[in-house]
């Protein structure tokens, strides 16, 4: 699976019309600023065994990942959110979070390429 589905971003550009490209570039910038913070929040919440904070951060990252076409990360965040909702903050969730951190780096790289191709 590709890190991002660029068709999602292309469709958003088209849907927004004249200012679509600029708006999508702003969206990508905000995503790149916020997503590492959400990952840090999940990592801290996992260490603190704070299931609700973990769930909220996973939910936020899931939603924002969907908006930039990061479908693989969105799916991982869905599972992380469910784990947080169930209070499951054990080794499996830690491994899933590590996988999500790796995928986020791939997503950021793919978004940089998308922006460069403008």
Image (cartoon, helix red, strand yellow):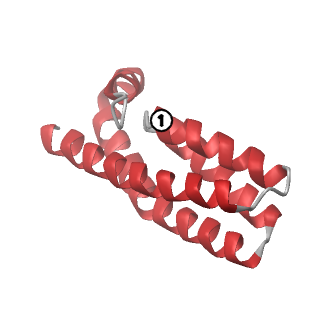
Position of residue 54 measured from the top left corner of the image (x, y, whole percent): 72, 62
Position of residue 19 measured from the top left corner of the image (x, y, whole percent): 33, 35
Regarding mark 1 in the picture, which secondary structure is present there?
Answer: helix
Query: 62 or 115, which is in the foreground?
Result: 62
Query: 113 or 90, which is in the foreground?
Result: 90
Who's the residue at 60% across and 70% down the image? 43
Q: Is residue 12 left or right of residue 53?
A: left
Q: Is residue 100 left or right of residue 116?
A: right
The image quadrant that residue 6 belongs to is top left
Q: Is residue 34 left or right of residue 58?
A: left
Who's the residue at 66% across and 40% down the image? 78
Q: Is residue 48 left or right of residue 16?
A: right
Residue furthest left as drawn? 117
Position of residue 107 measured from the top left corner of the image (x, y, whole percent): 35, 46
To which residue does mark 1 refer?
72
Who's the residue at 43% across and 38% down the image? 68
The image quadrant that residue 50 belongs to is bottom right
Residue furthest front as drawn? 91
Query: 47 or 17, which is in the foreground?
Result: 47
Position of residue 10 measured from the top left corner of the image (x, y, whole percent): 32, 25
- Quadrant where the C terminus sits is top left
Dot 1 crowding, Cα within 10 Å, few <14, some 14–19, many 20+: many
- Quadrant where the N terminus sits is top left
């Amino acid at each position: 699976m590709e890190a991002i589905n660029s068709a999602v971003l292309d469709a958003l550009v088209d849907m927004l019309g004249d200012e679509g490209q600029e708006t999508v570039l702003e969206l990508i910038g905000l995503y790149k600023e916020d997503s590492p913070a959400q990952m840090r929040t999940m990592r801290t919440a996992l260490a603190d065994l704070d299931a609700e904070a973990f769930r909220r951060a996973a939910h936020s990252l899931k939603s924002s990942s969907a908006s930039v076409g990061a479908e693989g990360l969105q799916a991982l965040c869905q599972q992380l959110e469910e784990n947080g909702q169930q209070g499951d903050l054990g080794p499996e969730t830690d491994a899933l979070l590590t996988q999500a951190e790796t995928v986020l780096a791939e997503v950021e790289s793919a978004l940089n390429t998308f922006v460069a191709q403008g």
